[in-house]
Image (tube, coloured by chain):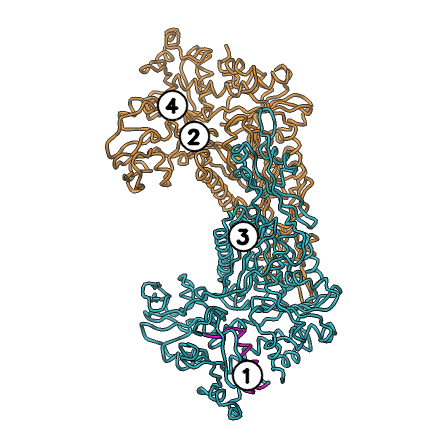
Chain colours: A orange, B cyan
Amino acid sequence: MAVSLVVLTQPGDARTHRELSVAAGTSILKAAHEGGVDITATCGGRGRCTSCRVKFVAGTIPPPTIMDEIQLGDDLVREGYRLSCQCTVTEPITVQVAPPLEEHAFQILGAGPGVGGLGVRIDAGIAKELVKVSLPREEHHQTSDLEQLAAAVGVAPESVGLSVLGGLPQALRDDPGGVTVTTFTPGSAGTGRTVISVERGDTTAMKFGLAIDVGTTSVVTTLIELESGEQLGSVSSLNPQAVFGGDLMSRIAFAQFNPANLRKLTTRIVGLLNQHVAEVCRASGVLAQWIYKAVVVGNTGMHHLLLGIDPSHVGLAPYAPVMRHPLVIAARQLPLKIAPEARVCLLPLVAGFVGADAVAVALATRLADSPTLRIAVDIGTNGEVLLGSRDRLLACSAPAGPALEGAQIRHGMRGAQGAIDRVRVDDDVHVHTIGETAAPGICGSGLIDLIAGLLDAGVVDWTGLIGVEARDRLPPALRDRVAMRGEERVFVLLRAGEAGARGEIVLTQDDVRQVQLAKGAIASGIAMLLHVSGVALDRIEELMLAGGFGNYLSIPSAIRIGLIPALPVSRVRYVGNAASLGAQLCLLSEAERARAETIAGRIEHVSLAAHPDFEQIFVDAMNFPRG
Amino acid sequence: MAVSLVVLTQPGDARTHRELSVAAGTSILKAAHEGGVDITATCGGRGRCTSCRVKFVAGTIPPPTIMDEIQLGDDLVREGYRLSCQCTVTEPITVQVAPPLEEHAFQILGAGPGVGGLGVRIDAGIAKELVKVSLPREEHHQTSDLEQLAAAVGVAPESVGLSVLGGLPQALRDDPGGVTVTTFTPGSAGTGRTVISVERGDTTAMKFGLAIDVGTTSVVTTLIELESGEQLGSVSSLNPQAVFGGDLMSRIAFAQFNPANLRKLTTRIVGLLNQHVAEVCRASGVLAQWIYKAVVVGNTGMHHLLLGIDPSHVGLAPYAPVMRHPLVIAARQLPLKIAPEARVCLLPLVAGFVGADAVAVALATRLADSPTLRIAVDIGTNGEVLLGSRDRLLACSAPAGPALEGAQIRHGMRGAQGAIDRVRVDDDVHVHTIGETAAPGICGSGLIDLIAGLLDAGVVDWTGLIGVEARDRLPPALRDRVAMRGEERVFVLLRAGEAGARGEIVLTQDDVRQVQLAKGAIASGIAMLLHVSGVALDRIEELMLAGGFGNYLSIPSAIRIGLIPALPVSRVRYVGNAASLGAQLCLLSEAERARAETIAGRIEHVSLAAHPDFEQIFVDAMNFPRG
């Protein structure tokens, strides 16, 4: 039986509604997705988060499930909120959706400072030349447009991409000045020089490329002039696959469900990249057809999903990728809407959870050339830790989850306008917000500051417990912020009205546990690599923090909560979005791209879960340092 | 202003009508095409034929244009017929369309007898093997599904097509017996062995290929088992591009008009090939995914249109093709709905009007190996003539047009049920029809018999004139059939009722001229190649007639009208659809496909129109032999 489901996507605005006809018994989440309405489901629709919550506007509100009660709490349940993944449609209803992730305007780290500092000789492998082609003149000359072109360029006809031929006859005849031929010569041994574009007239000055970092949570696309290496523009967005699951495992589970889901994930990311192309081109006045090369980095899951490769078994032990070798494909194959025969280069992968992004980080941080031992930590939903020098290179995955990006935290949010990004704790708490506007929530760097401060103040103990019992020992202002709410321990960071907050902003006991899990993943990754390589911490010359998170993070706070080990602060350095920087290096230098392959071959993957000492290391890493 | 145009596509059946809203001033033909209604326009909508005629059913019948009068004649004009290409819509009208080409059920020569007789060693380059792949077992094993597969097969991971990876993880895990891996090893130097398919379980016995002959008028697809060479099925259709122009030049003109037209032509032919795949697969019980190789032959125009390459300049002097080299592409690129990575091989081209079909004919007839001089004539709308031996190989185009296929002939029709295919003339005329049913018209072989008979009887003289003035010298039965109809000389082949004919069937003076043009094109091609090579006719050991036409043609009649030169009948031989046979050879033998490339390189193209002696040769060839 079909039942009507009306979904409102803008709060209080009945005009933005969609009426769907739904088979009775379908969950609201599933029905909405099938009807093309995005409802964010960070946990993949498993009742583990609150992102898919809807509010009943019309129709009978069903009794709450246990998951509704746990995730939403009594207040929201009473107000008519339900998790759309838990709630089935049995009669005509109207629901209001929480604003989807995309509608948050928020700050994602862009492409970083560029490759200028690394002293790399620019040779993108892309050459453009103005060529005068002598057209076939006599009927008995047995030749073709293509053969004449190939002879003028000095390549074989077979090396000219088929889609170049479409406009070839007209281009050759339009401009007596000649045609501009673009070729690609790969740095590694391989296919030789290929013709990827023929344009009428002289366009030799127009030569651009893209560095693309496809993260689980955010996607950064940077447009670069290939002669000078200049960054012309950068655009970043949330990965639109997130509506089908905030972490990689949720997305893999979604893809496992059926092939249509896999196609949906692929279409989403390809669609976003094409939006990015349109945006950077519009902003910089570059025509998309002048983009001849793109380098894509991402973790193994993102890589497979971009190519439409079934990642189901990447999510199952022994987590083997489907493929690992570096790929060079034509843009039309994705399709990425740049020059159709533009070369899209995907860097090689190492393992199921150590992907091309880790290779790019290793390349950009020069870890593989270092005479001394260094560590690179790429913090993200699916982070990685690398340890090594020119002698040996180890890597492991550090699946921190989205907590450090503010997700799955009661009042968490991403680093957007108004987010609390810095917290100082003395006799009371003092907050700083991004843009210094009213605070709707707290982002990852604020969360780390807050917990570091609460540890120092004795509000939270080394096991992570919010010390309600011991609050009488605290200064009065702090004491008043520690409370029980029902069964739950909370620390009230802001009361309604404080610092312009519209409502109360609290840190719950569960929030602390989420941060412990996240920092524990990274800390145990670092500890495991030190353990496996038999290296003592004091032999580490430098620890580099990379990722979209690093630039807002207080290093002392990160050390205080044990996210990174207790090195002297002088040995810890932000390196920005190193994965994107690695992609830029490979974009601008074929020698660097060849090197990425060598590096990938050198990286030894350390599997955390399979190691006999992992459990002890992880349990230790979950706790906070005793201060 | 928009005007209503109702188009009836089935005679007298108002249910099969389409109502279109048309901008006033649009031609009926253009409006119908834009509205998705097929009206055949053999001449490309230039008022040169009658194929696009419509009959007015409702609305004011406009005054006839001069083209209406010339093409349709007074009777049809009076009955409300008009050429839809000449007639614009200015007020609401309803018209009845002549049945489109596709609705004729008609006999096209199939794929011929197969390659059995040529003693070719079968090696299609396609190998299937059952492979047991050891899956990644431990997390620290740094490998991937693909690397394990590639190692088991003995190829590099790079040689595995990307679209194979989609289903790879599941296939590897589904069947403990292993997976069946299909590889392609090209015969010529090139890319080495590539993996084109991985299937679960053991499917090694299933290995099929397609030989595809894309003619201007008809398209023949043959399904072949690649181990035995057995033909499992063959399907042939009219080329659906014909609604946009019966001959190549009309279609090129249509493509020149705008890029959307080019796409339309490409979509039509790709769509037809996919229908063919579905049909041969259904009839033979073969799954399309088991087809791993296809060889396509066609003239340069058909080749370019299939690939979506702009053929505009192929139609302009010096008629240079856009490309000529042999291509091997993935089926998904067309897309042809067989195994996505199946190899689609297009044979090389020689010149703008000597295409891969001529190369295939040269290969199949073994012309290039012959110790003695032989001629091969491929009769078709865009025919070719080849002359040569192992020492030298010449070719020219012979654009006969569609007259010999019954098109652009007053009562002409294709070789379908009921067509008059044989005619004998003594004191009177005697006809034979295909299927011995009532005669709706005459096909090419009947036309040639008829004119040959009329030449012998003295009804038609050597210049082609129907001798109305001299009819008194004829036997009475013949005399009564020679008449003037208005200004027009006609020979009445059948009166209404004779041999069950529903209406009169006549041969007009213009019909004779059309046949003269067609046979003149072929005869002058033969004469020119003899002239250029300085070879006397009696040195020709054999003349081979190829094409969809040959099997119904009377060789003595063909010699009588001068379609082919006056060789002893014993030296003339039918060889069937040699182009399709050449495609089959290349499908079943990579050595033969490599050979096709050598042959293409050897063929010297003789340009007829550019030769100073062409005019005299053509004028001579237009006349009939004096008997």
What is the CA distance from the residue labelled 2 to the residue labelled 1? Answer: 98 Å
Q: Is residue B611 magenta?
A: no
Q: Are marks 1 and 4 in contact (CB under 8 Å)?
A: no
* Span highlighted in magenta in the image: B441-461
Q: Is residue A149 visible?
A: yes
On the image, numbered disc 2 is attached to which residue? A435
The foreground one among A333 and B623 is B623
Secondary structure under badge 3?
Answer: loop
**Which amino acid does the dot numbered 2 rest on?**
Gly
**Which amino acid does the dot numbered 4 rest on?**
Arg
With A538 as the anchor, is B602 left or right in this view?
Answer: right
Q: Chain of mark 1?
A: B
Mark 2 vs mark 1: tell me if same chain.
no
Q: Position of residue B458 (x, y in %)?
A: 56, 87
**Mark whose residue sits in front, 2 or 1:** 1
**Mark whose residue sits in front, 3 or 4:** 3
Above or below — where is A104 with respect to A441?
Answer: below
On the image, numbered disc 1 is attached to which residue? B454
Which callout, 1 or 3, points at the residue further toward the start of the chain? 3
Q: Chain of mark 4?
A: A
Q: Chain of mark 2?
A: A
Mark 3 vs mark 4: tell me if same chain.
no
What is the CA distance from the residue labelled 4 to the residue labelled 2? Answer: 22 Å
Secondary structure under badge 4?
Answer: loop
